[in-house]
Image: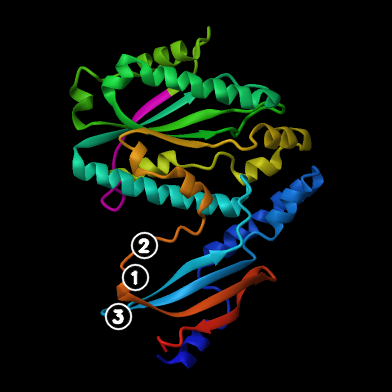
Amino acid sequence: MNTEIISQEYNSQLKETKFQEHKLHTSDLVLKLFDTGFNRQADKTAVCGDFLEFTLKEHLQTKEQKQKLHGANFCKFRFCPYCNWRRTRNITGQLKEALQQIKEEREVSYLFLTLTVKNPKMEDLRQTIRDMNTSFLRLARMKEYKKAVLGHFKSIEILGTKTKKGFAHPHFHILLIVNKSYFQSRDYIKQQEWKDMWKKALKVDYDPQVDVRRIKSKNKDWNEIDSAVTETVKYSVKHTSLTKLNDEDFTILLLQTAKMRFFSTAGILKDKMNLIKADEDLINLTAEQEQLWIEICKMLYKFQDGAYYLKKLTYDKEAV
């Protein structure tokens, strides 16, 4: 192995620009955290991803090379845009893999269900989400739901684009897995029936907004599973929406959502995903056929002056 060529190829900026892009997104959030007195979170977020370690591996048979993230100092703050990117990426990968397994086992289709409630005051957000989760359990126990739905993936978003000052907009994005025959069967649930069921589950005297639609492949390069995952796995709060909040609402939102989880699964998806691992392991190393790959070197990058630069290159003596 020609170590001189490797040194020349990896002696400058990191080629994968997404790391740099998401690192730069943390700046506004760090300033907001400092301004509102969340100094500990600000300090952690400020140095999030300052160091990235990649390994360069080569396949023994094909000689294909790949560069993979091996280590990083991620802060894991709930609303860090860098960590949210990694977290969402992990969950997306798990969900796609799980849906592919299910597709190989049986013929299924997918629905995208959005469930809302009246916008609560920001200080009532935690209790509102608790009530929504309890209400969704009631919905999932209804005979109509149990007959129609094989499993689901549920995420929560807590702000809207036009949410008034002092209020939140919590709503569920839910991927429903149904039998392929669902749309022609007696188990089919109409839009109005979904609305009536959600209203009954919420135990409210108003008509909540409910939207349900079938998910289809967009084109030959974008299959049904890709469409389903993209619709459902979203950030609970976009960092741009978060930093635009006034200081009071920002402070209350962080306190109201502390230690809260925003994703859940049930039914045939339950045992096919590990959301705790996806939430906590932002490196997401996978066990592949390691006996066919040899590690050539490790590359340590440091973020400075708005970009990642190689600081250390360590070779595997046996490989080179």
Decide: marks 3, 2 in contact (CB < 8 A)? Answer: no
Percent coordinates x, y for residue 199 in the rendering: 46, 13
Image coordinates of residue 248 in percent, x first then y, are 77, 33
Q: Amino acid at mark 1?
A: Glu
* Residue 245 among those drawn in magenta: no
SS at mark 2? loop
Coordinates of residue 194 in the picture (x, y in percent): 38, 18
Left or right: residue 215 compared with residue 187: right
Q: Name the residue rendered at 48%, 37% in the picture.
A: 263
Amino acid at pointer 2: Ala
Mark 1 or mark 3: whose residue is earlier in sequence: 3
Residue 312 shown left or right of residue 87 in the figure: right
Location of residue 201 with respect to 245 vertically, above or below: above
Q: Secondary structure under badge 1?
A: helix
The tag on residue 60 is 3
Q: Can the viewer see residue 116?
A: no
Q: Which residue is mark 1?
A: 290
What's the magenta region? 211-223
The spot of residue 26 in percent (x, y) is: 66, 54
**Image quarter hosting the N terminus:** bottom left
Q: Which residue is mark 2?
A: 287
